Image (cartoon, rainbow, N blue to C red):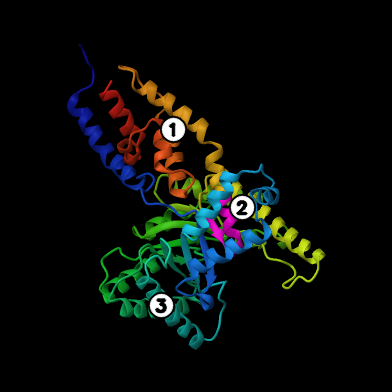
Amino acid sequence: MNRSLDPAELEAAAARLRPANLAFAARYTGETARRQPVHTVYQGAQHFRHDAAAEHGRQALRALREYAPTARDFAHALGITEDEALYARVVEKLEREPVEDFRVDFEDGYGYPPDAEEDSAALAVADEMSRGMMEAGALPAYVGLRLKALNEELRPRSIRTLDLFLTRLLERTGGRLPEGFVLTVPKVTIPQQAAFFADVLEMLEARCGLGDGTLRFELMVEVPQAVLGADGRTPLPAFLDAARGRLTAAHFGTYDYTSGVGITAAHQRMRHQACDFARHVMQVAFAGTGIWLSDGSTAVLPVPVHEHPATDAQRHENRDAVHRAWRMHFEDVRHSLAHGYYQGWDLHPAQLPTRFAAVFAFFLAGRDAAAARLRSFLAKAAQAGDSFDDPHAGQALLNYFLRGIASGAFTEVEVLERTGLTQEELGSRSFHHVLEVRQAGS
């Protein structure tokens, strides 16, 4: 066969392209295999105890039993069809693992006390966390601190708190950190703040005898300038570069952001279109990088209006108040999930039932259709000589089941039975790998 291209010229052109292709592949590595928590629970540092996760579970179950003791009551509160299996899954989750990620808050949930008071709190939190490390199962899978912002006013206090906490914790534990330890930096506005924090973490690792890259952090997108900079571009990719491999997640701050774009308090809510815009920019900026995305919180909390109800009318008012807040939280979480945000914040133990209900219902609702479609894809892939023209759709289906397993909505056995995947294929997390296996065996 005759060809026109000169091999040497072609290789020279390819040599110019190759570094860019490799750099792109190195940056966009795809989703991480680590389990992403479905939520982050926040609590002020002044309230933190080593058994905070278990206590949140106890309070969540107490709220569920008081305000929705049956599946019918719960469904009525959320505005969904009664589902005994869903209710049972929620109860089981609250009993087994009520909190997946816990953040001890030294920012908005704590306040701005005198330095001596925050110094004492940093040491007390370290003591409680070290105690939790000594008791199996006391700490959740992920745990850490939210510090204060890194602007000129708050930066010294923020870093002092981190230094005191980490030094004390490592003294108490013989140099060990909790599994899944992470730090949260709020109100990041410029890449230099991410770079500075990476510098601080490098210093701490060197001083405290921690391995390189041990300390990781997540940033919060809370100000309009973090979404769109003065040059008309989003600075989010620059935040990632400045973190030098230490960034794990980006969390959206609903109320600071809506305030920053001029939305009045009465209209500041999770489902505001302004929030959708910011979250979509975050998605595009971090797509394919392995950076987790988290939505914000529902500010209306499911708490009774009467602390000690003395009449039936007061008890009904309490139930109605909790049910209204539950439905709002449930709908907020569903909105996040539908927009591709699989994690969000919970601010109160009584939000845990609706968090898990929304997550489980979301995945269970699409399970059968997704399984049928994936089985069809697998059957087509097994046909000898056939080319599969929609691998991205196949990967999306596989990701759906992987996220469902991670969330607790499915078991691995259920997924294997419904999809026809093997355990090895599911564990590969790659639809391309599944195609190769199926086509090689056909």
Residue tagged by mark 3? 126
Label whose residue precedes the other's in the sequence (3 or 1):
3
- Label 2 to label 1: alpha-carbon separation: 36 Å
- Of tags 3 and 2, the one toward the viewer is 3
In what quadrant of the picture does the C terminus appear? top left
Crowding at mark 1 (Cα within 10 Å: few <14, some 14-19, many 20+) = some
Q: Secondary structure at mark 1?
A: helix
Q: Work out how far the residue at label 3 is from the one at label 1, CA to CA, in angstroms.
A: 45 Å
Q: Residues within 10 Å of mark 3 (few under 14, many from 20)?
A: many
On the image, the x and y values in percent for residue 156 come to 45, 79
Q: Earlier in the sequence, mark 2 or mark 1?
A: 2
Q: CA distance from mark 3 to mark 2?
A: 35 Å
Q: Which residues are magenta?
A: 344-357
Q: Which mark is in front, 2 or 1? A: 1
> 128 left or right of 432?
right
Residue 387: percent from the left, percent from the top? 35, 20
> Residue 413 in the image: x percent, y percent?
39, 40
- Give the amino acid type for the residue marked by disc 1 in the picture: Arg
Which quadrant would residue 110 be assigned to in this image?
A: bottom right
Q: Main secondary structure of the magenta part?
A: helix
Q: Which residue is mark 2?
A: 275
- Which type of secondary structure does the marked residue at label 2 adopt? helix
